[in-house]
């Protein structure tokens, strides 16, 4: 799942799951979990090849997910 955290909610009708504010991402992953999805691969590629050379940008995407969206110890979405 390609994902990107934004500073404010994405309000486009065509918003893709995995793109938006942390609250939107939490809801996206909660819905996936409710559907029975057990594994998701997170892809932070943004069609900017040069950005992929700067791994700290990618880690800035993963860290808040681990801290606020996922309960890594329980392997689930936080309640």
Image: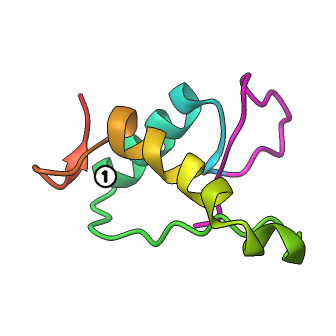
Residue drawn at the location 49% of the way across and 52% of the way down: 62
Q: Which residues are magenta?
A: 1-16
Q: Is residue 47 visible?
A: no
**Residue at 86% over, 34% down:** 12
Q: Inspect the magenta stretch and tell me whether residue 45 lies in it.
A: no
Residue 6 vertical placement versus 76 (above, below): above
Q: Residues within 10 Å of mark 1 (few under 14, many from 20)?
A: some
5 and 11: which one is in front? 5
Q: Is 12 contained in the magenta span?
A: yes
Quarter of the image with the N terminus is: bottom right
Label 1 SS: helix
The vertical placement of 59 against 37, above or below, is above
Q: Is residue 15 left or right of residue 65?
A: right
Classify residue 54 as left or right of residue 79.
right
- Mark 1 highlights which residue? 33
Based on the displayed image, in which of its 4 quarters is residue 7 positioned? top right
Residue 16 coordinates in the image, percent (x, y): 71, 51
Q: Position of residue 11 (x, y in %)?
A: 81, 27
């Amino acid at each position: 799942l390609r994902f990107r955290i934004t500073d404010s909610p994405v309000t486009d009708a065509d918003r893709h799951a995995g793109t938006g504010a942390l609250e939107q991402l939490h809801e996206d992953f909660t819905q996936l979990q409710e559907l029975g999805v057990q594994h998701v691969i997170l892809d932070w590629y943004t069609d900017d090849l040069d950005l992929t050379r700067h791994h700290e940008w990618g880690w800035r995407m993963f860290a808040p997910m681990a801290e606020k969206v996922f309960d890594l110890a329980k392997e689930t979405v936080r309640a």
